[in-house]
Image (tube, grey):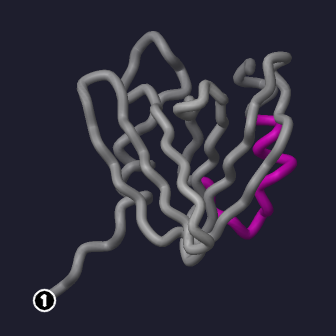
Amino acid sequence: MKLEMIKEHINRTVKNDQLLIGFFHAQATNSRRYLVTVCKDTIHFNLINFLEKVEVSDIFSYREIASINIIKMAKYCRLHFFFQNGRKLTLKAPYRSVSKPLFITDEILERLQPPSEVS
């Protein structure tokens, strides 16, 4: 998807009261491609079809996600989402890439990680 199309889609789907943290492209283990939009209170999983169009959008609040496991590698991050309803989703996203414009940033990873316990 082109960056202009992505921004237009995000402007249509993200409500004004939601704070946008960032967005990135990711690929599932079954070769499906996603545009993931991370907001302060929600995560939007947008399935992209082979014509570069958003086919299906799923919106989850962080309360609906049981846990998120993040594995950082040199060029990619693996994200394992475990939902309260028993579903699982594994995504692979480019990490700090110069050649890929829609990579996952440290700011997005920080928001996805659970808050640390204060003792």
Residue at 52% across / 32% down in the picture?
29
Report whether 86 appears left or right of 55. Answer: left
Residue at 54% across / 49% down in the picture?
89
Residue 50 versus residue 109 in the image, above or below: above
Whole-percent x and y of residue 19? 62, 62
Whole-percent x and y of residue 35? 66, 36
Front residue (pair 78, 9): 78
What element does badge 1 sit on?
loop
Whole-percent x and y of residue 105? 41, 39
Counting labels gives 1
Report whether 76 appears left or right of 84. Answer: left
Whole-percent x and y of residue 3? 70, 23
Instruction: Give the magenta part as a residue range.
Output: 7-20
Residue at 38% across / 38% down in the picture?
78
Q: What residue occupies the far top of the structure in this picture?
A: 99
Q: What residue occupies the far left of the structure in this picture?
A: 119
Q: Which residue is mark 1?
A: 119
Residue 38 versus residue 52 in the image, above or below: below
The quarter of the picture where residue 18 lies is bottom right
In the image, residue 55 lies in the stretch drawn in magenta: no
Q: Quadrant of the N terminus?
A: top right
The quarter of the picture where residue 113 lies is bottom left
Residue 34 versus residue 86 in the image, above or below: above
Q: Quadrant of the C terminus?
A: bottom left
Front residue (pair 56, 109): 56
- Classed neighbour count for the residue bearing mark 1: other residues with Cα under 10 Å, few (<14), some (14–19), many (≥20): few
Residue 36 versus residue 1 in the image, above or below: below
Amino acid under disc 1: Ser
Residue at 76% across / 44% down in the picture?
10
Is residue 40 visible in this depiction of the protein?
Answer: yes
